[in-house]
Image (tube, rainbow, N blue to C red):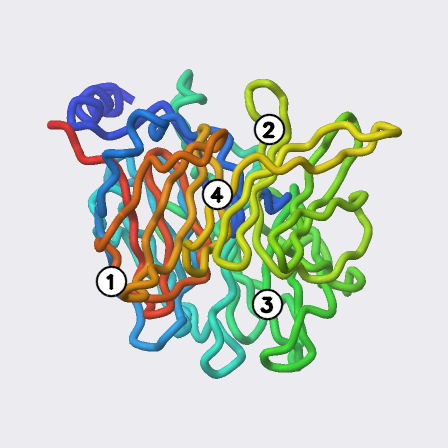
Amino acid sequence: MGILKRLIPALLAAGVALGLGADWLSLRGDAQNSGWQRDEKTLNTRTVGRLHLLWQHKLSDAPDSVTDPLILGPIITHRGIKELVFVQNQAGSVYAIDADLGRIFWNRSLGSASACSGARPVQPTMNASATADAGRPSGDDDNFSDGNRPLYTLTAAGMVFPLRPSTGDDFSPPFQFVPAGVFPLRIGVSDTTLTIATAETCGGIAKVDWSIPVSAAGVPLGRAAPAGASRSGFAVEFTWHGKSWQATVDQNGAPRLWPAGRAVSQTTGRLASWEDGERTRWIYTAAQNQVGAFQLRSAEGGEPAVTPSWRLSNLGPSGPPVVANGIVYFLAKTAVDGLLTLRAVDALTGKELYTSKDLITSRASSGNLAVANGHVCFSATDSQTYCFGLPFEM
């Protein structure tokens, strides 16, 4: 620990952000698909204007063959304290990239990650509620992320590989999850249950969720079994006035509210939700070339009613919004040259705080962003992964 005590001040002097531990461990940040980064502290309305492109990597030659990124850190590794960005490509290679330096920290080949020719690989995931805390410095639990949890990755053959985030080695032995003849679409983990949504045909929609209990070490505690009809996977869940709700968005960009647990059809737009410091619940939607903000108010009988707050129009096709520390981030496609731009606006007013202008050379993306510890990362359909952040202050 003496080396660590000498290392931390040096990293702080170099501008490396410690004491944060704001992770992004699933496609939309959490099991509720909220798109809300609750722990971001580095980027705020004063600092976000200094964002710039830290790095970009092309990790495949095939189009649309790299997953959206996950972010974990800072964690203790054999090469010091690192914040890592994880992506997987269609060939089954998993990459961990240094979030600040853009250097590949480790990579591992697991075999094909997609059962469909030309399909995007299944997004890896990690357990945000993992309780294991090995790997954290004693007495500094608030300063570091929990690096002692599995990074769950899935191959086309239905094999799950729980990997150790710091090295890429097996966290626990790989195991067979879904049977042959089904096509995995999404993988998720909540507490100690691993779930995979599958389709019946290549390119089909989710029909069945398979689940299996796993230990904290990622070891299966039984056999995978169908867990019923697959949910849409796009609804945002939240608690409002003591009741659980889920939100979807219609083709016009307006939110629709449903009691939690009710089966709803797949949404036609994308959305995020958060609760501000005044405990006001906000919903942000992206549909039909616009991004809108809505607040929840009490209607007759105490049911929630949606009130429009602000709207940005004529953006070009926009990806799903993400909200972090009072800022809404999203990708939009410019009308002039069709290139992607990263945009950041004030979550309360919609005032523009940052635009990446011509820094991005890609033209399309799923739009899903990962935001943590001053980093905003995403993957494009040309298999480029981008990561924005604040410049080092040496």
The residue furthest top is 139
Report the front residue among 257 and 365.
257
- From the image, tell me which residue sits under label 1: 361
Looking at the image, residue 21 sits to the left or right of residue 294; the answer is left
Q: Nearer the viewer, mark 4 or mark 3?
A: 4
Amino acid type shown at disc 4 = Val
Q: Quadrant of residue 353?
A: top left
Q: Earlier in the sequence, mark 4 or mark 1?
A: 4
- From the image, tell me which residue sits under label 4: 322
Looking at the image, residue 20 sits to the left or right of residue 349; the answer is left
- From the image, tell me which residue sits under label 3: 185
Q: Earlier in the sequence, mark 3 or mark 1?
A: 3
- Per the image, label 1 sits on a secondary structure element best described as loop
Q: Earlier in the sequence, mark 2 or mark 3?
A: 3
* Quarter of the figure with the N terminus: top left
- Distance of label 4 from label 3 (alpha carbons): 22 Å
Q: Earlier in the sequence, mark 1 or mark 2?
A: 2
- Per the image, label 3 sits on a secondary structure element best described as strand
